[in-house]
């Protein structure tokens, strides 16, 4: 039975017939009917006498497990006793990665609420969308983000109150937390299938979708990927660049470390320079970031001591083999590649170090099954290119969204990625399904061309898309950021084209190359190929007009 008084989220789940098939075969995925995931992630460590162990480390403050537990309790009391939160209410969270953001996240869930976290750089219109979609009445926000938050309030009539932290005002969250008697809090007696998180997609393929996750989902990603692939322990110190509003960041910087009683280093600024400096200063052992960051850090390694690192995790976009090999040569560490999705919460394909096959994403994470299917959902033979289908202990449940039928088909989650599975069961990324380039009858995967270009020493970054072409339908077009000392002239273009022809099938070479100073990316570092496609289409239409 649900503990939620406000049943909005449950009422707006897709019909059961549209859910994926969930699998809980592993013993560690058998959860009790009643469970609050924050008890498992946080409270149990203090109950076991490990309250003094380091938990959150930041440039401004560090908290032990006991100190974080008290902060979470105080926020939970503010939510329920001061602000009137009832189980099932949605709470918007806004803030950069910080101990306060982590504490607020856990407090909402412990109190029986549902977290809706948003990226710090979103503007008012983008903030107002999830407020309306999830009917959110309360927000907790870092005071430094107040300007856009207040603009969003004017656009979102559902939002009734915003409480800021860090302002020092009389009504600031810290002031409310100091109320006597707020240091203890009994966790809400939630069901394991009560909703605790609505994570919104980035909206790169259309209007953002709210993905619904249960208490058991939070632990399932820890007990599948975290336990069987990452294999961290209590001595580890996690660090990374993804925002906590991005489920890649939530897992890598909060869920996985807390599940094993480890510490996590929380930094607000996480550029490659910032990340390297923090790894050195705080002696991080596990880092989560995107392929672009690993490539950028390669050129800066000489000035930093990162010998404390033992594991590096990559997700968000495909990891080029050239980046994997260069990082291995420079550090001796094999990057753990993986594919995840907001719909699935975290990584569902990825292999531990000893099973890595360079260039492949890996094998399905224990607890998950994956296959490559055709347009009708039929499983394809090994070494065939098709759509990726996956199922396991987590899966897609959109909040009141007709697109549920597109993502879940025949009980499988259809992720929108094109893959090949080899005879040994390794999955090889080809492209996002809408990133396949069809040129003169050939199917060409943009990321494969990108990987070939990145092997050339002149190329710092690149993005490859299909550009409209009257003769071929589409041609392969590359947008390239050159390294210092190289010029984007005809000679360089010919050099890069010949390099690609010598690296992969010649018909895949970029017939046109445009040199740019930067590539369009999301806040989490993902390449926005849809923006490159728009640029390519605009260029093509201008040529036709002239």
Image (cartoon, rainbow, N blue to C red):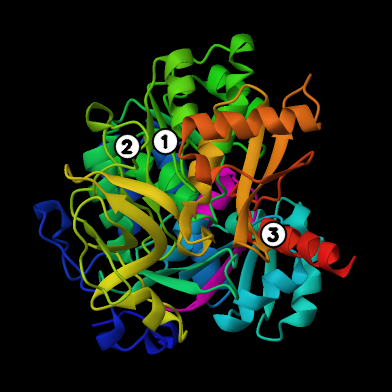
Per the model, the C-alpha gap separating discs 3 and 1 is 27 Å
> At which x and y percent is residue 403?
45, 81
Q: Which residues are magenta?
A: 85-104
User: What residue is rendered at 67% in x and 37% in y?
Assistant: 269
Circle number at residue 313: 1
Residue 274 seen in render: no
Disc 1 element: strand
Mark 2 neighbour class, 10 Å CA radius: few under 14, some 14 to 19, many 20 or more: many
> At which x and y percent is residue 523?
65, 51
> At which x and y percent is residue 237?
42, 28
User: What residue is rendered at 49% in x and 33% in y?
Assistant: 239
Q: Please say whether residue 329 is one of the residues in the magenta stretch.
A: no
Circle number at residue 531: 3
Disc 3 element: helix
Pick whichever, 522 or 190, lies toward us. Answer: 522
Mark 2, residue position: 261
> At which x and y percent is residue 141?
67, 60
Per the model, the C-alpha gap separating discs 3 and 2 is 41 Å
- N-term mark: 1 or 2: 2
Please report contact status of discs 1 and 2: CB closer than 8 Å, yes or no: no
- Is 44 positioned to the left or the right of 316 in the image? left
Quadrant in the picture for residue 215: bottom left
- Is 401 positioned to the left or the right of 538 in the image? left
Disc 2 element: loop
**Quadrant that contains the C terminus:** bottom right
**Disc 1 versus disc 2: nearer the observer:** 1
Per the model, the C-alpha gap separating discs 1 and 2 is 19 Å
């Amino acid at each position: 039975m649900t503990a939620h008084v406000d049943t909005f989220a449950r009422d707006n789940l897709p019909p059961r017939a549209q859910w994926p098939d969930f699998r809980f075969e592993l013993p560690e995925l058998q959860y009790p009917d009643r469970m609050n995931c924050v008890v498992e992630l946080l409270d149990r460590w203090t109950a076991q006498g490990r309250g003094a162990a380091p938990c959150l480390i930041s440039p401004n403050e560090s908290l032990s497990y006991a100190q974080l537990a008290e902060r979470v309790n105080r926020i939970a009391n503010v939510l329920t006793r001061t602000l009137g939160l009832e189980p099932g209410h949605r709470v918007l969270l806004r803030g950069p990665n910080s101990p306060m953001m982590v504490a607020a996240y856990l407090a909402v869930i412990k109190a029986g609420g549902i977290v809706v976290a948003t990226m710090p750089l979103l503007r008012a219109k983008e903030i107002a969308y999830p407020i309306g979609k999830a009917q959110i009445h309360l927000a907790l926000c870092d005071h430094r983000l107040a300007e856009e938050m207040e603009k969003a309030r004017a656009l979102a009539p559902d939002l009734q109150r915003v409480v800021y932290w860090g302002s020092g005002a009389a009504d600031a969250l810290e002031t409310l937390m100091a109320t006597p008697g707020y240091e203890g809090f009994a966790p809400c007696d939630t069901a394991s299938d009560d909703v605790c998180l609505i994570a919104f997609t980035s909206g790169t393929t259309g209007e953002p979708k709210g993905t619904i996750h249960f208490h058991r989902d939070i632990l399932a990603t820890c007990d599948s990927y975290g336990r069987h692939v990452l294999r961290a322990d209590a001595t580890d110190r996690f660090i990374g660049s993804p925002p906590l509003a991005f489920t890649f960041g939530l897992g890598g910087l909060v869920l996985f470390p807390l599940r094993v009683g480890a510490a996590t280093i929380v930094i607000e600024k996480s550029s490659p320079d910032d990340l390297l400096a923090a790894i050195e200063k705080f002696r991080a052992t596990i880092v989560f970031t995107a392929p672009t960051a690993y490539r950028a850090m390669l050129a800066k390694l000489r000035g930093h001591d990162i010998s404390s690192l033992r594991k590096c995790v990559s997700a968000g976009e495909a990891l080029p083999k050239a980046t994997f090999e260069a990082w291995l040569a420079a550090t001796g560490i094999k990057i753990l590649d993986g594919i995840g999705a907001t719909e699935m919460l975290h990584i569902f394909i990825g292999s531990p170090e000893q099973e890595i096959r360079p260039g492949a994403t890996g094998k399905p994470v224990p607890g998950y099954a994956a296959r490559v299917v055709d347009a009708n959902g039929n499983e394809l033979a090994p070494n065939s290119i098709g759509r990726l289908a996956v199922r396991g202990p987590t899966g897609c449940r959109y909040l009141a969204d007709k697109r549920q039928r597109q993502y879940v088909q025949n009980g499988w989650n259809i992720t929108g990625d094109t893959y090949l599975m080899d005879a040994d069961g390794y999955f090889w990324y080809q492209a996002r399904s809408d990133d396949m380039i069809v040129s003169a009858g050939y199917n060409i995967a943009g990321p494969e061309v990108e990987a070939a270009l990145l092997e050339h020493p002149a190329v710092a970054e690149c993005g490859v898309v299909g550009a409209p072409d009257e003769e071929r339908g589409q041609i392969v077009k590359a947008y390239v950021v050159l390294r210092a000392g190289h010029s984007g002239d005809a000679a360089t273009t010919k050099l890069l084209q010949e390099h690609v022809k010598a690296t992969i099938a010649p018909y895949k070479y970029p017939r046109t190359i445009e040199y740019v100073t930067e590539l369009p990316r999301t806040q989490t570092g993902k390449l926005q190929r849809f923006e490159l496609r728009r640029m390519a289409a605009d260029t093509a239409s201008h040529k036709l007009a002239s």
